[in-house]
Amino acid sequence: MESSIPLDSNCSFISSIWTDILAFVAGIIIIYRSYVHKDDILAMIGGVIIIEHIWQLLPKYTMKK
């Protein structure tokens, strides 16, 4: 699906790199807070945020222009 959408379109996986950086930082902070408070649910949420943005980064930098 990603290859059929023009790279200049306004899609979430074509967002600014700063969006992904902030999401990684937020995910790491959430995982750290879950460690401090011993909350497994928060750790999963932080991990999911990081994994989702990795999935968004891969098509962004592997698609041919």
Image (cartoon, rainbow, N blue to C red):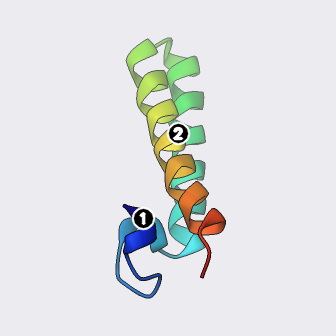
Q: Nearer the viewer, mark 1 or mark 2?
A: 1
Amino acid type for the residue under numbered disc 2: Ile
Residue 52 lies left or right of residue 59; in this view the side is left
Quarter holding residue 62: bottom right
Front position in the image: 15 or 65:
65
Name which residue lies at 35% across and 73% down: 11
Relative to 27, is 10 above or below? below
Label pair 1/2, CB-CB below 8 angstroms: no
Q: Which residue matches tag 2?
A: 51
Name which residue lies at 57% across and 71% down: 18
Name which residue lies at 37% across and 84% down: 9
Q: Residue 7's spot in the image, x, y percent?
A: 47, 81
Relative to 45, is 10 above or below? below
Q: Residues within 10 Å of mark 1 (few under 14, many from 20)?
A: few
Q: Earlier in the sequence, mark 1 or mark 2?
A: 1
Q: Residue 58's spot in the image, x, y percent?
A: 60, 55
Relative to 6, is 52 above or below? above
Front position in the image: 1 or 50:
1
Task: Give the alpha-carbon distance from disc 1 to disc 2, as whole Å.
Answer: 18 Å
Amino acid type for the residue under numbered disc 1: Glu
Quarter that holds the N terminus: bottom left
Quarter holding residue 59: bottom right
- Indicate which disc residue 2 carries: 1
Disc 2 is placed on an element classified as: helix
Residue 39 lies left or right of residue 35; in this view the side is left
- Indicate which disc residue 11 carries: none
Name which residue lies at 38% across and 67% down: 12
Q: Residue 35's spot in the image, x, y percent?
A: 58, 19
Q: Residues within 10 Å of mark 2 (few under 14, many from 20)?
A: some
Disc 1 is placed on an element classified as: helix
Relative to 14, is 52 above or below? above
